[in-house]
Amino acid sequence: TKVNSVSIRAEAINPDIRKTEDKVVDAVVVTELSKPLTAYCRCWRSGTFPLCDGGHVKHNKATGDNVGPLLLKKPKE
Ligand code: FES
């Protein structure tokens, strides 16, 4: 496939997380957040998916990628 003259090879982004599921979907009820900060993985390399375990650091170093987590923060009171 070519997009804007760049060749794109079809490749799975998720190497090994919950592969028996047709689609990996997680839901969070925001009012249940109790911690001031929760980090959700967006690199699909976390050992604690859907939470970030810092695995993106190793991935970024190995690949030159720049992925990082989604941070959910409680508002300051
Ligand atoms: Fe995936 Fe941190 S381990 S974003």
Image: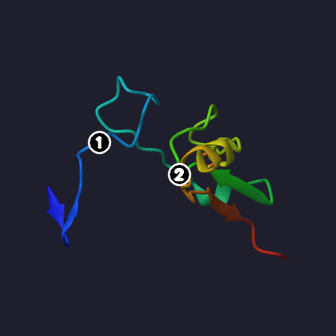
Looking at the picture, how far across and down is residue 34, in whole percent? Answer: 77, 53
Left or right: residue 35 compared with residue 54: right
Find numbered disc 1 in the image and state the secondary structure of the residue it sits on.
Answer: loop
Q: Is mark 2 within 8 Å of ligand 1?
A: yes
Find numbered disc 2 in the image and state the secondary structure of the residue it sits on.
Answer: loop
The reply to whether dot 2 and dot 1 touch (C-beta < 8 Å) is: no
The type of residue carrying mark 1 is Glu
Q: Residue at x 38, y 26 (%)?
A: 19
From the viewer's side, name the closer residue of 65 and 69: 65
Left or right: residue 32 compared with residue 77: left
Q: Give whichever of discs 2 and 1 has the lower sequence position.
A: 1
Q: Name the residue that disc number 2 marks.
A: 42
Q: Count the marks.
A: 2
For the C terminus, the quadrant is: bottom right
- What is the spatial separation of the Cα atoms under label 2 and label 1, in whole angstroms? 16 Å
Q: Residue at x 50, y 42 (%)?
A: 44
Looking at the picture, how far across and down is residue 16, in whole percent? Answer: 45, 28
Q: Quadrant of residue 11?
A: top left
Q: Name the residue that disc number 1 marks.
A: 11
From the viewer's side, name the closer residue of 57 and 16: 57
Q: Residue at x 71, y 54 (%)?
A: 38
The type of residue carrying mark 2 is Arg
